Amino acid sequence: MTNRQQLRVGVVGCGNHGTNLALAVARSGSLQLVAYADPDATAAERAARATGGVSTHASIESLLELHKTSIDAVLIATPHDELAR
């Protein structure tokens, strides 16, 4: 699958869960991770190091502004709650 066929994705993360989602997107053959946002700047930097070449944002608003021109979809990570069934 070429880059033109890939869906360009931005991830709004929530700590480790968001980082894992970003890694899954980066490994996908049909998705291209282009941006990552997390209010926790450390989490955003960690995701960027792990995936490489990704635009990082400390605010969700700046990622959504980019969404208007460069992102096809935004994925929002939420913490996994083991008690929720």
Image (spheres, rainbow, N blue to C red):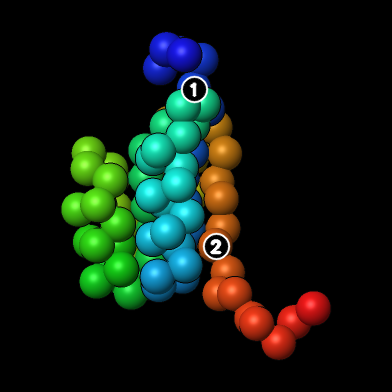
Dot 1 falls on a residue whose secondary structure is: loop
Where is 60 relative to 33, above or below? Answer: below
Q: Which mark is residue 56?
A: none
Q: Name which residue lies at 55% across and 46% down.
A: 74
Q: Is residue 17 left or right of residue 59?
A: right
Type of residue at label 2?
Ala
Question: Mark 1: which amino acid?
Answer: Gln
Instruction: Give the residue pinned by disc 2.
Output: 77
* Element marked by disc 2: loop
Q: Within 10 Å of the Cα at label 1, are there few (<14), some (14-19), or many (20+) other Cα atoms?
A: some
Above or below, 63 against 19 in this view is: above
Q: Residue at x 19, y 53 (%)?
A: 49
Q: Which corner quadrant holds the C terminus?
A: bottom right
Q: Tell me where residue 54 sits by quadrant.
A: top left
**Residue 81 visible somewhere in the drawing:** yes
Q: Position of residue 46 (x, y in %)?
A: 24, 62
Farthest-out residue, right: 85
Q: How far apart, in angstroms, are the residues tagged by discs 2 and 1?
A: 20 Å
In the picture of the structure, the residue carrying the numbered disc 1 is 6
Q: Residues within 10 Å of mark 2 (few under 14, many from 20)?
A: some
The reply to whether dot 2 and dot 1 touch (C-beta < 8 Å) is no
